[in-house]
Image (cartoon, coloured by chain):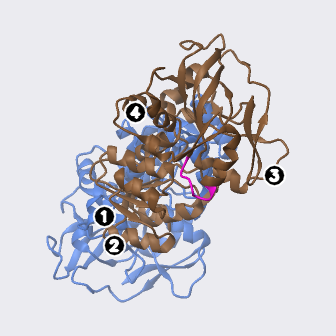
Chain colours: A brown, B blue
Amino acid sequence: MRATFMYGPGNVRVENVPDPEIIEATDAIVRITLACVCGSDLHPYRSMDKTHEGVPMGHEFLGVVEETGSQVNGFQRGDFVVSPFAYADNSCPICRDGFQTACPHGGWYGAGGVGGAQAEAVRVPQAAGTLVKVPADVDEALLPSLLALSDVYLTGHHAARMGRVEPGKTVTVIGDGAVGLSAVLSSRRMGAERIILMGRHTSRTDLGREWGATDVVAERGEEGIAEVMDLTGGEGSHVVLEAVGLMPAYEQAYGIVRPGGIISRVGVPQYEDAPVGFGSLFGKNAQLAGGPAPVRAYLEPAITDVLEGRIDPGRVFDAEVGLDQVADAYKAMDDRSRLKVVVRP
Amino acid sequence: MRATFMYGPGNVRVENVPDPEIIEATDAIVRITLACVCGSDLHPYRSMDKTHEGVPMGHEFLGVVEETGSQVNGFQRGDFVVSPFAYADNSCPICRDGFQTACPHGGWYGAGGVGGAQAEAVRVPQAAGTLVKVPADVDEALLPSLLALSDVYLTGHHAARMGRVEPGKTVTVIGDGAVGLSAVLSSRRMGAERIILMGRHTSRTDLGREWGATDVVAERGEEGIAEVMDLTGGEGSHVVLEAVGLMPAYEQAYGIVRPGGIISRVGVPQYEDAPVGFGSLFGKNAQLAGGPAPVRAYLEPAITDVLEGRIDPGRVFDAEVGLDQVADAYKAMDDRSRLKVVVRP
């Protein structure tokens, strides 16, 4: 089959590899219907160390079950499914807490011998815990929105949930990428009174306004902080949803969070150490939350929301490529000419 | 009057200085009945830069109002009062949120022209917002417990509150100082199912057991982490209350927190940067909370709890000195021969 690998900055290739096979009795093989490129894929696209091995890429997909291991109950060949971007057994105490991305039997696509989803097919470990069925006769027009549940929309939802967004709160979203826009939509659905979107790509912030942003701040750094402080009467934002993952976004976040407020991060941090002492978080009792979204915890009700037309998160997709053109998708997202690109194998 | 100043590591002196005077119309002058030495006073005692100016020390006290500025409504000469360790107007939006330590009109004793409380008297800015009256005829035996509300007990309470301690949760308290022990007592009152106290001074951990600790772990670092993980079936602690403020305590905290759990810090961090990325907090959706306790928000019900005998937080005091012996109190707390020392001017 054809599958996508990354070898270094800007170096994405589609290659022929053996078809995936069942290894564990809890595995399933899923043939990919739709996949896409993630904002988090752009971090290695810009800065990874060169490698001769190639890293399998892609972790968001809709697909059709092709084969199941002997312990994969409840699924059979032909089932149409959506997968969270991480696999998990969905039955251990940590999963029952609702933190499936920390499942001790879980893991990530494209790592540890598991392939990526920007491919014709993928092996899904812990398939019974990971996959969720979607009606096979779903309207084709809804597929992008179902695909968006695999990661981006529910990552935005997770940001808002861990940020404890609720009626009466002022929420600031840092980043106008697909996750940031999803965080705006989620915050509106949770009743935020005011939603300030920090971003400077008008085509994106326009969708943000449509989804609930009440204010848009194009400035960054100290100027951006000053603007948000001004908008909030000098008090700062109750909740800050950080959907970027770079240090300047983190610095903006603690600059604008209100005393006692919450910074919820879902952009994968491209740093390990960061300011948390008296001058940043501690002095004003600011809280820090967030992490990889446990999409599996949120998937069923979100599928219903899409099928019944209450949300349309697929609007973040503004282009589609075939699998052999996936490098073009990376390039277009990297240079910001596209927001998020569907990959159809 | 006599007042305490610190000039460098181990260098604490009591000196004659002019009596404090009303400067702002919102000030009061309070004659100190009881003060004490704080664990946070030991940080500069060990590591401050030498100075010729002398830093005024002490921020916990009970006292009697001696004089009030023209805008200090509700207080008069002779009122017996307890003060939070920070002053605040208690009326601005941030104070109304319950985060008085971030009040834009507030501040700290011993800084910005305000004296310390290890003294015969002190000027209290924003007195009407800061001070809380205590019945003048209160039993002398209750005074240590009222004094403990000025900082240490309600700092432990704040740790537990920001850690969202509730029935069914496992709570680990790092540090067996007066704040750590107070955090144990607070966690028990909030219904924690299990309370693991990390500390190795038996006389202290014995009080911790009396106040609700179900387990005591004397090991530190990797061994301490392994022990707590073992006690929690490999899953970690829902809540970690960090009452030390040093980096090894922070590292222990993220080592033992359960995925999706909360680290709540009230030890003043002796660091600005710390690990918060994928390998520490983000990867397991661990949350970070805490800061200087807004004691004022918790003071009235806690005074009632003390007066009605429901809590006895004054048990953390195990010695008393006169003001001129305050240097001995620092030394005894620094070498761990005393837990917390009352200063009676």
Residue shown at the point (32%, 64%) measured from the top left = B100
* Three-letter code, disc 1: Ile
Callout 2–callout 1 Cβ contact below 8 Å:
yes
Which quadrant would the N terminus of chain B be assigned to in this image? bottom left
Q: Give the image location of residue A83, x and y in percent.
A: 56, 29
Query: Can you say whether A177 is above or below B108 in the image?
Result: above
Q: Which residue is mark 2?
A: B104
Badge 3, how many Cα within 10 Å: few under 14, some, many 20+? few
Apparent side of residue A77 relative to residue A182 in the rendered image (left or right): right
Name the foreground residue: A328 vs B322.
Answer: A328
Residue shown at the point (60%, 19%) measured from the top left = A65
Callout 3–callout 2 Cβ contact below 8 Å:
no
Magenta residues: mostly which secondary structure? Answer: loop
Badge 2, how many Cα within 10 Å: few under 14, some, many 20+? some
Q: Secondary structure at mark 4?
A: helix
Q: CA distance from mark 3 to mark 2?
A: 50 Å
Q: Which residue is mark 1?
A: B94
Q: CA distance from mark 2 to mark 4?
A: 45 Å
Q: Which residue is mark 4?
A: A306
Q: Secondary structure at mark 2?
A: loop
Q: Secondary structure at mark 1?
A: helix
